[in-house]
Amino acid sequence: METRITELLGIKYPVIQGGMAWIAEYHLAAAVAEAGGLGLIGAASAPPEIVREQIREAKKLTDKPIGVNIMLLNPNAEEVAKIVIEEGVKVVTTGAGNPGRFMERWKKAGVKVLPVVASVAMAKMMERAGADAVVAEGTESGGHIGAATTMTLAPQVVDAVDIPVVAAGGIADGRGLAAAMMLGAQAVQLGTVFVTAKEAMVHSNYKQKILAAKDIDSEVTGRSTGHPVRCIRNKMTREYLRLEQEGATFEELEQLTLGTLRNAVVDGDVVNGTVMAGQIAGLIKEEKSCAEIIHGMVEQAERLLGRA
Ligand code: TUI
């Protein structure tokens, strides 16, 4: 299944792992890489030296390409941007903002840059700034989201730019991969399904919450603050949405979620913690290895596309 993205990134299958905060650490990234996809270390809000260590650990486990995701709301982004160059990382994806200020330095260092975008305007801006590809991420995704759905965003971005497009949001199997290809995407980025991967160092309560989720079990908190975040409904989201409806301030709402993603991922607090996951959680029923996830979805997509 060769595409412009597999060629660009030097990977076997057109499957990219999301750069999920606290979740996308080196064991997961290396397992995805070994299975033929692009594994990513999510820098999120980790101290920059931890990100460096993570990159080095991943390289001990695989000689296949590994990328780093940089979350642009993080004040550490500047330092992490430097570290990826120093450590010879060849692929960067970015999220939650405009990576324009780093682009020239990364390009000079030979880093392939794939900004995650949630609109056509942002995709065009990224192409002009020198991006090698864009990830068009729909609102079905977990975590920080935009407004457009994958089904509507992906083909509009495909038509608007000449660089290859990766579709993300609401994809977890071969049907999703085949559908994304039919929309004109050259690869898919998956988050939620990799959270449940055997190699993901995520508390079993968090994995179980995803495996038990049904189609309509996610909520979006923070629409009023300008930072909408999709996560699985629990005591925290109920309290958050109640406060939001009552007109709570940004600070009050921040207080409620501070550190709660870590509490869910690391400590397994899925009651008061933030269980970020996409709307496709309902499709995921069992814990599988990264190889089983990737090989299974590629086989299924090939069967479907052969028929199409
Ligand atoms: O970044 C993500 N997903 C994330 S980041 C994250 S950590 C976090 N935790 C709590 C609150 C906020 C963040 C959890 N999940 N996905 C990529 C993504 N980027 N989705 C949407 C966008 C995006 C949105 C607006 C990209 C660019 C953009 O442009 C705005 C601008 O700066 O012009």
Image (cartoon, rainbow, N blue to C red):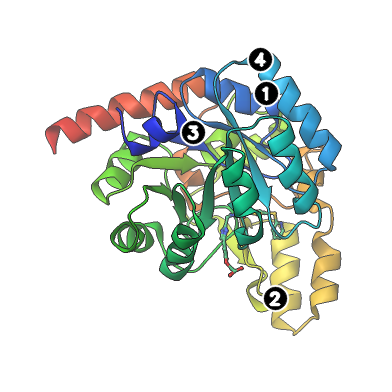
- Lateral position of residue 135 relative to residue 86, left or right: left
Tell me residue 221's x, y (percent): 66, 67
* Residue name at image x 72 percent, y 30 percent: 87
Quarter of the rendering containing residue 56: top right
Q: CA distance from mark 4 to mark 1?
A: 8 Å
**Three-letter amino acid code of the residue under disc 1:** His
Q: CA distance from mark 2 to mark 3?
A: 33 Å
Q: CA distance from mark 3 to mark 1?
A: 22 Å
**Three-letter amino acid code of the residue under disc 4:** Leu
Tell me residue 208's x, y (percent): 63, 36
* Residue name at image x 56 percent, y 34 percent: 194
Tell me residue 97's x, y (percent): 62, 62
Q: CA distance from mark 3 to mark 4?
A: 28 Å
Q: Are marks 3 and 4 in contact (CB under 8 Å)?
A: no
Residue under pointer 3: 285
Residue under pointer 2: 225
Judging depth in this view, the residue of 279 and 301 nearest the camera is 301
Closer to the camera: disc 2 or disc 3? 2
Neighbour tally class for label 2: few under 14, some 14-19, many 20 plus, Cα within 10 Å:
some
Closer to the camera: disc 4 or disc 2? 4
Tell me residue 181's x, y (percent): 28, 43
The label number, if any, that marks residue 138 in the structure image: none
SS of the residue under disc 3: loop
Neighbour tally class for label 3: few under 14, some 14-19, many 20 plus, Cα within 10 Å:
some
